[in-house]
Image (spheres, coloured by chain):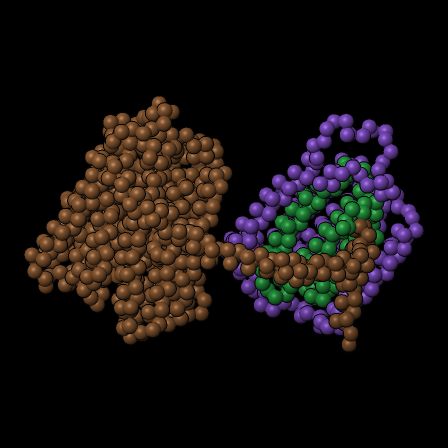
Chain colours: A brown, B purple, C green
Amino acid sequence: MNGAPLLWLIPALPLAAVLINLLLGDRLGRRGAGWLACGAVGLSFAWSVLSVLRLAALPEAQRAVVESVYTWMRVGDLSVDVSFLLDPLSAVMILVVTGVGFLIHVYSTGYMSHEPDVRRFFLYLNLFMFAMLTLVLADNFLLMFVGWEGVGLCSYLLIGFWYERPAAAAAGKKAFIVNRIGDFGFLLGMFTLFAWTGTLQFQRMFEVAPQLFPAGGIVITVATLLLFLGATGKSAQLPLYVWLPDAMEGPTPVSALIHAATMVTAGVYMVARTHVLFQLAPVSLEVVAWVGAATALFAATIGLAQNDIKRVLAYSTVSQLGYMFMACGVGAFTAGIFHLMTHAFFKALLFLGAGSVIHAMSGEQDMRRMGGLAARLPWTHGAMLMATLAIAGIPPFAGFFSKDEILASAFFSGHPAIWVMGLAGAVLTAFYMFRLYLLTFRGRPRLTHEAEHHLHESPPAMIVPLFVLAVLSVLGGLVGPPLQEGGHPFARWLAPVFASGAHEGGHAAAHEIPVATEWMLIGLSVLVAAAGIAFAFRAYLWSPETATRLRERLSGVHRALLNKYWVDELYEWTVVRPVYHTAQAFWRFWDTKVVDGIVNGVGVTLEGVSAVLRLFQTGFVGTYALLFTLGVVALLLHFLRP
Amino acid sequence: MITVLFVAFAAILVVSSLLVILHRNPLTSALFLVLAFCSLAAIYLLLHAEFIGLVQVVVYAGAIMVLFLFVIMYLNLGHDVESGVTLALRRGLGWLLGAVLVAEGALLITGRLAPGPATPQALTAAAAAAPGNTQQVGLLLYSRYLFPFEITSIILLVAMIGAIVIARGLREPAPAEAPAGSAPVTAAAPEEAPGEDA
Amino acid sequence: MIPLSWLLLLSAVLFCIGVVGVLVRRNAIVIFMSIELMLNASNLAFVAFSRHLNSLDGQVFVFFVMTVAAAEVAVGLAIIVNLFRLRETVFVDEINLLKG
């Protein structure tokens, strides 16, 4: 690479937009705020593309550019730089983050056009982009943690964007607090690794880790499990997934950007980034795989019975993130990142499409009051259909390739149980996604009269991003077709990052198994997807009484699903209330009696003493000068004493 | 010769600065202060600190003292009558302390410090060859002390703004201005209306 | 050549005159002039030592002291002008607001 790579420009551009936004304030105007935010992210995207192209021009072995901006802190042995790492993995991430982010920014200019405080919205959105890009480009744990916390903060701010609504404010707090549990794990994992390796820099740590830690050792297992706890918080996995569905209280572009395409994938990215460590701890990998698979299945079942269009998508996101962790857990990091990318495309599209529907319906989110929208919203309908096919896993749409690769990796790495869970999840995914599609766009309109009156297709600012994302959802998977000799192009691109791993579960094994088996697996996953879709058509379009009958026959199950297995209630009774009551008790005794007592005691004592001392304070400058000189004279006398 | 000049200027300096603090009329005090500054500038010249000597005249005797005189005349403070028992007490104590301080200083200098060498070594020849004092100070100011030097410009700017803001005073509504003939407010008067000391 | 001790003695005397001025006068402007005297006393000491040690740093410091003095005078006189407007006096013994 010629000259300085100037990687810092990528996160700095959104930050600059944040600062300009803050400095100019309302003088920026509504239009100006939108233009500024889009422009900054667009430039950041352009610069990312340029940087990645320059990275791709390098020989494969040298594709890791580190750029140190400045030394952040140097304490004893610890030296932390603000430095950025661009390698094939972070290249994929910055392209996804800035690319999808840019589209969502453009979309927001249309979606938020009726919003009074649009400047604050773009301020937070740009701040989020800055934090996310810092997270992705960081070349050490500490800087990554800065981005990690930054995206958490922005997530909180954006979920609670409509803070005057109590539900939104509560959802923001819930997201923040649940994330803190995960962050606590991340921090402890980071400290553990630092205590043993003495460095926080990724590349150096990965170099020394294999010598320091025996494979399967207790320390590395604990450290990676703690890191994974952080990932479960940020990426909404069992048991910390509860915040994500509530996060749908935020504006829809936020759900698309933060809670579907980028931030929630940070956990997956982190696990992939530290794959060297995870591979040293087979137990941790096993845990990752099982948690991922369980989440994928669990969230998919909840998604079956939800009626809010955004909540269905939220549970679908949790489920798809489970697939990504499943892939990482079975050692197929490439497949996980592949699914991360395709998921970013089609899930962002789904959310933006849902946003377009909500926008058209003047804020209605309940699918029971939609239906038959295909004719009225042709563009939105087309885009949503593409995305739904993609997530259901129908070839040749993007989701098929990545999901199939994950399932194949699970199968060939010797995890048949996980494979079965993934397959079951795939059926459910196809079913609930087509349920969403059919309830929204097909069938008999069930709109309220008022909504029907206002119904309109969205402005171009919203349709164009939908279109671009639809193209990506259709074609995005073609970078990684299965059954390629030596791995598909996407895998070859990521190979320099993941090649260092001891074993690459999916791929190394994939070439030793007969092609026929792989064809069979592909056929099977297409078959189950088709079955799910067919059942959805039967239950929600051709003979709606099927759904009703089913609901009545399985009323207990249905109630459990509708209430999300009462997990929120469980947490409420086992965690929230005990903590709350303990805190209340402490406050009543310790805080008001002891702490306030000490503080008040100090105050009363000072008041008594100063009542006496106040007599010296006459208020005349002359007196003060006199006393001051008296002091100087006395001091000199003291020093002149022989 | 230099010693004679020094003693002469030092005498002028001490006498004029004593008159600064002794004279009843502040205007006269200010003029004596100008004299004191000028004689100090002459002493600086004797010490081969030409740059400082000139700056002393320009800045102190020129700029700062003009400011003093301007304020004295602006406020019409041609007289300064002092009286009162507490004042006399403090004045007596002040003179006493001053005398003690002088004694201490003399003791310190004579007792602890031997008189310096009559000729500072290695200066005569070097100084003759070296560039002028102003040039040397300038070089130092723009090299080693560049940063503090730039800071002083900020200090001056801040002082300028601060002085303007303070001297502009509170913008009060017109009726609050007391008529010219009203009794002056004294310390014995009750506390002034709230808000004035904000 | 002038001995260092003479210069320091002169500086000390000048300083003490300044101190006495601050203590015995009640006119804020005269007090201010006395403070200027003290600053000049310190300047004299700086220049004396600069001469004695054959180093110009002392003179640079005098320069800085003068700058600060100029700033101080500007602000201080502004305060006095404002004070006079509010209380119609510049006598420090008639102003006792400097207390809690």
- Of the pair A623 and C59, the residue shown nearer to us: A623
Residue A225 appearing in the image: yes
- Of the pair B82 and A26, the residue shown nearer to us: A26
Give the x, y percent position of residue A236.
35, 53
The residue lying at 78 percent from left, 59 percent from top is: A608
Judged left or right of residue B56, residue A353 is left
Residue A59 appearing in the image: no
Quarter of the picture containing the C terminus of chain B is top right
Quarter of the picture containing the N terminus of chain B is bottom right
Give the x, y percent position of residue A563.
38, 47
Q: Looking at the picture, does residue A130 appear above or below residue A452? A: below
Judged left or right of residue B161, residue B32 is right
Q: Looking at the picture, does residue A292 appear above or below residue A17? A: below
Give the x, y percent position of residue A142.
40, 60
The residue lying at 79 percent from left, 69 percent from top is: A637
Outermost residue toward the top? A453
- Of the pair A446 and A295, the residue shown nearer to us: A446
Outermost residue toward the front? A553
The residue lying at 32 percent from left, 29 percent from top is: A446
